[in-house]
Image (cartoon, rainbow, N blue to C red):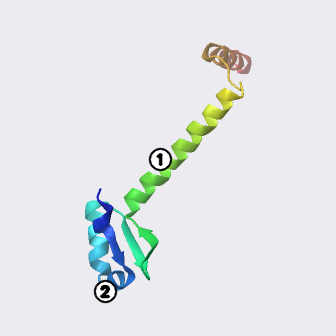
Amino acid sequence: MKLSSQIKPISYLKAHTAEIVRNLSLHAEPLIVTQNGEAKIVIQDIASYEQTQETLALLKVLALGARQIEEGKVQAASEVVAQLRERSRQSE
């Protein structure tokens, strides 16, 4: 993805909104909008946004798991399975 072609001033956004929405849906590339020469906002299609949010959630889960491993807050899978089987037998 070449971001340099996806940088537009806010005046372009105002004048070409429908075209921008159409392009975002087709190409799934974010648009960086500048104001007074500075990057101010990023606009992206909803599918890309949802994918980004899902990716962030997965990364948070992985980071939490890595932290728990470092802190020794883990159990062997065989122990967990044995505990679950025992609970299942007790509830019968």
* Furthest-right residue in this view: 90
- The residue lying at 70 percent from left, 15 percent from top is 86
Among the 4 quarters of the image, the one containing residue 4: bottom left
Find disc 1 in the rendering and name its residue: 55
Q: Where is residue 26 shown, x and y percent of the image? A: 25, 63
Q: Is residue 27 left or right of residue 35?
A: left
Q: Position of residue 22 (x, y in %)?
A: 27, 71
In the rendered image, the vertical position of residue 22 relative to residue 50, given as above or below: below
Q: Position of residue 23 (x, y in %)?
A: 26, 69
Closer-to-camera residue (7/73): 7
Position of 6 compared to 81: left or right?
left
- What amino acid is at disc 1? Thr
Query: What SS does tag 2 mark?
Result: helix
Q: Where residue 7 appears, x then y in whole percent? A: 34, 71
Q: Is residue 35 left or right of residue 60?
A: left
Which circle marks residue 15 in the picture? Answer: 2
The local crowd at label 2, few if under 14, some if 14 to 19, many if 20 or more residues have their Cα within 10 Å, is few
Quadrant where the N terminus sits is bottom left
Is 23 placed above or below 16 here?
Answer: above
Foreground of the two, 82 or 9: 9
Q: Quadrant of the C terminus?
A: top right
Q: Residue at x 72, y 21 (%)?
A: 91
Q: Choose top left, top right, bottom left or bottom right for residue 10.
A: bottom left
Looking at the image, tell me whether mark 1 or mark 2 is earlier in sequence order.
2
